[in-house]
Amino acid sequence: MPKIADKYLQIDPWKVVEEGFDAERNRVSESIFSLGNEYMGVRGYPEEGYGGDTLLGSYFNGLFEESPVTAHYKGIIKSLRFMVNAVDWLHTRITLDGKTLDLAKSKFSGFRREVDFRTGVYTREFVWHSAGGKDLKLTFERLVSMKVSHLGAQRITLEPLNFSGTVSVRTGLDLAVLHEDQGRHYWQVQKQGEGAGKIAGLLGVTANTGNRLFSAFHVEATEMVESKLVKDESYIGRELVLSLEQGKPTQIDKLVVNVAEKDHSKSTDDLWQQGMELAGTVVHGGYDAVAADQRSYWDQVWADSDIAIEGDPENQQGIRFCIFQLYQTYHGDNPGFNIGAKGLTGEAYRGLAFWDTESYCLPFYIFNNPKAARSLLEFRYKSLPEALKRAKELDCEGAFYPIATIDGTESCDLWQHSNLQLHVGTAVAYGLRHYARITGDTAFLYEKGAEMLIQISRFYATRGQWGSQTGLYGYYGVMGPDEFQLMVNNNCYINLMAKKLFEYTLEVLSAMQTEAGEAYRGLAARLELTTEEQEDWRNKAQHMKIPQDKQTGVYEEHDGFFDLPHLDIHSIPVTQFPLYSHWSYDRLYRYDMIKQPDVLMFMFLYSSEFTAQEKQANYDYYEPRCIHESSLSPSIHSILAAEIGRSDEAYRFFEFATRLDLDNYNRNTREGLHTTSIAAAWMNIVYGFGGMRSDGDQLMLNPSIPERWNSYRFPVTYRGTKLLVEVDQERVSIQASGGTVEILLYGESCLIGEAGVQVPVRKAVVS
């Protein structure tokens, strides 16, 4: 089933540019032009108000509300938590000759908007043609500071083209925002008013969870003749009257400080004082200073993480957009935050984090920003108590990490997913293993990781059972990564990942005894860990059922999968996609059709464990059965296709990876960006064409290059040393800075230092 691009944006290597306003695509653009800094995010909605189709979205990482869920059985969740829409800190209304600007009703021309990856600034401009014949050029700029998490900035430039006169501008903070997904408002203002230096603010509290948000702003304007404070129940702002002169630009600069607080022990007065003091220290620096800091931050990002492609301008723009969004979504300045499936760009998936974080997002941060990678794992350690509670709800011991969460509690109200999808815990364990091997940070592994591994192993040791006929250990009544197979037994992915979990936990505990004996003994005593329990894990790992046809080498996705009715997925009319919207729910589970990689997923994660022949056999069996209903699916297929020499097929899967949202391939970008798929696009280049594998004892690189590319280059940080990999149609060059490391290049051991190495590129051989 083809995925067709909806191309309406300009191609630029360092920007996303939209020329002309298309009301039908406005929500798509609002997602694409979203800004964020890990702490807070804001969609690209028109701050001056828009009467057309729009999602006014302003979100804060981990700031949530909840709604009750009717639970009829033990183990089914009782409440649903979700990222709540918050303050509209960009709120602006512009009035000229008694008429208020609204692009849904007003006449305008010359519309253009862009986001510049090098500055982090979103700019929008057009000329408003008033009913009275006046032409007013308006330019809106905004940024969310990457250096000061709480800080946002806005600049509005007004230039009268054919008149001189006054214009009224109201700007401020609005907490009367609708949470569209739930269809209601969730905020009540507890306090509002002015502080020192004409800083105005308000403090709101959510209706059910009692989470609070302080927001304050300071505004300056040239040519201002009048300014007064205005407020109502959920709003505080300033009404400005500006005297405009024909042909002369007039600026309004607004700096905003937002402080989200989930600690109920802090008093309202203390939070207000803390917020006002913070605002007083940062808002008077001025817009230009904040913008300069922003430019400096992004200069360093591109020096550290840029992927350059010569000969493919669309994917050059696409991968830089992906890297830009990954840094906006997360950079590790706020330990304990996680990455929602839509980041901070929309309400779809409710701001919840899934196993995608460790499986798809973590590799980018491990190789580009290890501090952020550690911070992501800190979230799992911080939420370990909730995982322990959740395991008990499901009659198990240890830690059962939720399939969807914003604060560590389970927030998936579909029991078949929240109760049967066991693979989050093994993804967390894999993330710990991956992080420690690449960064060498055994301190974190021993201080926090080992405790998580023990508790995750306890869950898998009590959730599984022994087969009455085979005498092998496995998991019954589960759902694997392929969500089109419900309540199955011995899902191969779950079983294999559990086996590797047990083995890795035992490996870490053995190393701890040797390298950090006192820490090991303290941990073992605190968790009542015994030798007998560890031997039980070893026994279950050794006797884990891994279903496989030994003759063909194909792993069976779960017991009985090979006997399921076959369905030619290419016979399904394209009008029936997505299937969730067009097929009855139970119909999805009747065939050998799969939603996304399951067997192929563990072959990617533990690549060094499988032969090339096994990968080819399993790819040939499962790829024709996969409908790629998940945006995460094509990248894994592309990576494996590149490895087995299917270069054309690898490129076809790759084609929409970097531009999934820019070209709205899935026709749902309006709901928010596919943040974890954006991370998969980075993997597609580095693991796919770059041929990197990072699961073994040494980093491996087997670069290839698409025929249509002239060259490409990417950096990775490996054990504290930065490697720059450059590939063209003739050669591969790898250079190290900050140290010397040994890697495997095309299977041969190679010591990389500052002098670098250069070898001929090996063309992929079609299998």
Image (cartoon, rainbow, N blue to C red):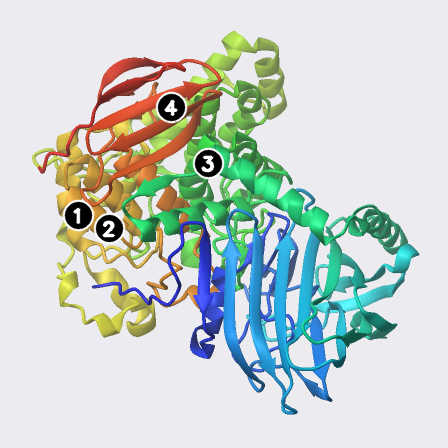
> Mark 3 = which residue?
305
Which of 221 and 493 lies nearest the eye of the viewer?
221
Query: What amino acid type should be assigned to the residue bearing mark 2?
Result: Phe
Which of 305 and 748 lies nearest the eye of the viewer?
305
Count of number-bearing discs: 4
Determine whether label 2 and label 1 are within 8 Å by CB. yes
Determine whether label 4 and label 1 are within 8 Å by CB. no
From the viewer's perspective, is the residue at label 4 or at label 2 nearer?
2
Q: Is residue 268 left or right of residue 44?
A: right
Distance of mark 1 from mark 3, alpha carbons?
Answer: 27 Å
> Mark 4 = which residue?
503
How many residues crowd mark 1 within 10 Å: few (<14), some (14–19), many (20+)?
some
Determine whether label 2 and label 3 are within 8 Å by CB. no
Relative to 621, does residue 527 appear above or below in the rendering? above
Distance of mark 4 from mark 2, alpha carbons?
Answer: 34 Å
The residue at 30%/73% (across/down) is 582
Q: Is residue 180 visible?
A: yes
Determine whether label 3 and label 4 are within 8 Å by CB. no
How many residues crowd mark 3 within 10 Å: few (<14), some (14–19), many (20+)?
many
Query: What amino acid type should be assigned to the residue bearing mark 3?
Result: Ser
Which of 537 and 189 lies nearest the eye of the viewer?
189
> Mark 2 = which residue?
653
Q: Earlier in the sequence, mark 1 or mark 3?
A: 3
> Mark 1 = which residue?
649
